Amino acid sequence: MDDPFKKLLVPTPSADKKPRKARQIAYTDWGDPKNPHVVICVHGLTRNCRDFDYLAHALKSECRVIAVDVAGRGRSDWLEQACDYNFPPLYLSDATSLIAHIQAQYNTKITLDWVGISMGGLIGMILSIQPQTRTTIRKLIMSDIGPLIPATALRRISDYVGLDPRFDTFEAFKAYMKKISVPFGPLTDAQWNHMAIYSMQKYEDGTYGFRYDPRIGTSLKGFEIKDIDLWQQWDQVTVPTLVLRGAESDLLSVDTAAQMKMRGPKAQIVELPGIGHAPTIMNEQQIQIVRNFICC
């Protein structure tokens, strides 16, 4: 696959209100740049925008697809201060900057859909209720995330995020990535290889490690881990919403998904067997479910 990376300079809101330098976020841009139907895709906590290559290839004849590397991940700049990784307004600021940047390329208002896996879904959910973007997002797709995130799942994630393991070979790195990514469900060898290539960076000493700032994990450890309750925000969501749930997920429970179907936007819930946290939207079945929701 080709490598259509672009960069955008964005401001850096800070948790301590002190000034920070502007930095760059990276994104891929697929499809016709004149197509006013734009789909923005945002990955999970330590993933990157290349996870959406398969979805982008499926959608690019009908939509323009923008997939972004969140701050500190992929090819986006790392933050100066680790505490800022826990500052939600920074992520919303980056998202609104990207939307404004894309909208400025058109003479008419774009039609914007949002696809978010895990953390990316939360960003889309909160963004959809902000006054400046409430009427901007037309449809919202959230993969295995909801307004109640249990502490048990957060502890599991914090156990491996930020460890910064290094490996002597790419194959050893890939094997480790597959081991900790088992909840993603069955993927083809080509898909695992694709994920490994874009998840990896090679260091000057010849070792291989993950392409994200390990301080993302260490910053999480500075806080008491407890349930995250965002039902108040969920009840404000009004855009049509599709939620993919891994049937074996420890992050999005059956009960939470059932309530999401009854409250707020009354989401359409699709449960996927044999998958935990989180559906990657790489295989044909998941892609088709998302495509049908976006393009109908």
Image (spheres, helix red, strand yellow):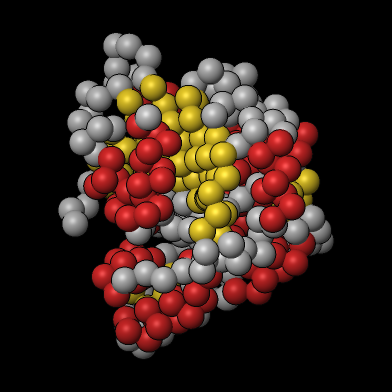
Residue at left offset 77%, top offset 34%: 232
Q: Position of residue 61 (x, y in %)?
A: 21, 36
Q: Is residue 208 left or right of residue 268?
A: left
Which residue is situated farthest in the top direction here? 107
> In this picture, is 207 found above or below 143?
below
Image quadrant in which you'd find residue 82: bottom right
Query: Is residue 227 something that shows in the picture?
Result: yes
Identify which residue, 25 or 139, lies in the foreground: 139
Residue at left offset 78%, top offset 46%: 229
The quadrant of the rendering that contains the N terminus is bottom left
> In this picture, is 217 found above or below 9?
below
Query: Is residue 23 something that shows in the picture?
Result: no
Identify which residue, 178 or 254, lies in the foreground: 254
Residue at left offset 57%, top offset 45%: 269
Image quadrant in which you'd find residue 155: bottom right
Q: Position of residue 101 (x, y in %)?
A: 38, 26
Q: Is residue 1 left or right of residue 278?
A: left
Identify which residue, 16 or 198, lies in the foreground: 198
Q: Position of residue 215 (x, y in %)?
A: 59, 63
The quadrant of the rendering that contains the C terminus is top left
Q: Across the whole image, how many numbered discs are drawn on residues?
A: 0
Q: Is residue 101 left or right of residue 230?
A: left
> In this picture, is 30 found above or below 171?
above
Residue at left offset 37%, top offset 54%: 285
